[in-house]
Amino acid sequence: MDNDIELVHAAQRGDQRAFAQLVEKYEARVYNLARKMMRDPQDAEDVLQETFISAFRALDRFQGRSQLSTWLYRIAYNAALMRLRKRRVPVESLDEARETEDGELMQPRQLVDWTALPDELLLSKEFRGKLDAALGSLPESLRSVFVLRDIEGLSTAETAVVLGLTETNTKVRLHRARLALRERLTTYLSPSLADVRPVVACTEVGR
């Protein structure tokens, strides 16, 4: 953090190399957030570029009241959100029951605690691919909180700042995101979870 402040102050004085160091330090993390939100590499690149252009223009207004990473995430999140809104991406409700193709309501499914799974499965390339696909199916409001909190490792307070939410609302969204992802991955994980006791039931909301 101290090094970030030194680089910011240098960049505010016109040191372009200092700003370049900040870009180099945070561009991968900003891109990862943009990629998870946009689900398109080119759109993520555009968000990345917009983020650092906006950060450069607003650098004089950064006063160090939050971590630089939180400030950059906030800019990136807003840039991604604007693009998603222009796309008019449909929002899926996780509160309403859904129907099958035959018009019947989907039945509740038993969800299991995947923390009981072996680490080698959770860290496998196949599982990460399934998780990424499941994450992409979530509404932006849930996807963003999960990415920031559980993938990028921000604290609840930092995540709340980025998303412009209260900490309580952040916790609620994170809980819903985790449950939704667990539900979506239950079918894939069921062979490995045969001996694991179900922990919660939830109305199916799509895979």
Image (cartoon, helix red, strand yellow):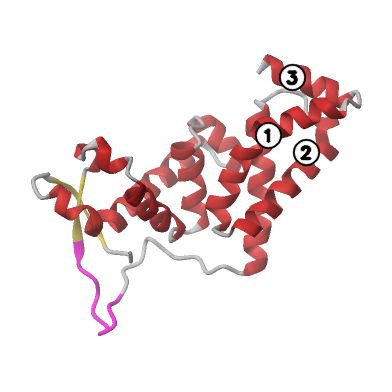
* Label annotation for residue 71: 1
What residue do we see at 39% from left, 57% from top? 134
Give, as a single range, the part of the protein colored magenta: 99-108
Tag 3 near tag 1, CB within 8 Å: no
Rendered location of residue 120, percent (x, y)? 26, 38
Q: Regarding mark 3 in the picture, which secondary structure is present there?
A: helix
Rendered location of residue 165, percent (x, y)? 56, 42
- Is 91 rendered above or below residue 143? below
Please give the residue where the numbered disc 2 appears in the rendered image.
55
First in sequence, mark 3 or 2: give its number. Answer: 3
Please give the residue where the numbered disc 3 appears in the rendered image.
5
Q: Please, what is the three-letter code of the amino acid marked with disc 3?
A: Ile
Tell me the quadrant of the picture where the N terminus can be found.
top right
Question: For this rendering, which residue is in front, 206 or 33?
Answer: 33
Instruction: Give the side of residue 67 with respect to residue 32, left or right.
Output: right
Q: Nearer the viewer, mark 2 or mark 1?
A: 2
Q: Please, what is the three-letter code of the amino acid marked with disc 2?
A: Ala
Task: Please rate how many residues cluster around mark 3, counting C-alpha atoms within 10 Å: few if below 14, some from 14 to 19, many from 20.
Answer: some
Task: Please rate how many residues cluster around mark 2, counting C-alpha atoms within 10 Å: few if below 14, some from 14 to 19, many from 20.
Answer: some
Tag 2 near tag 1, CB within 8 Å: yes
Question: For this rendering, which residue is in front, 98 or 194?
Answer: 194
Q: Determine the main secondary structure of the stretch shown in magenta.
A: loop
Q: CA distance from mark 3 to mark 2?
A: 14 Å
Magenta stretch encompasses residue 45: no
Instruction: Give the side of residue 183 with respect to residue 56, left or right.
Output: left
Rendered location of residue 86, percent (x, y)? 67, 66
First in sequence, mark 2 or 1: give its number. Answer: 2
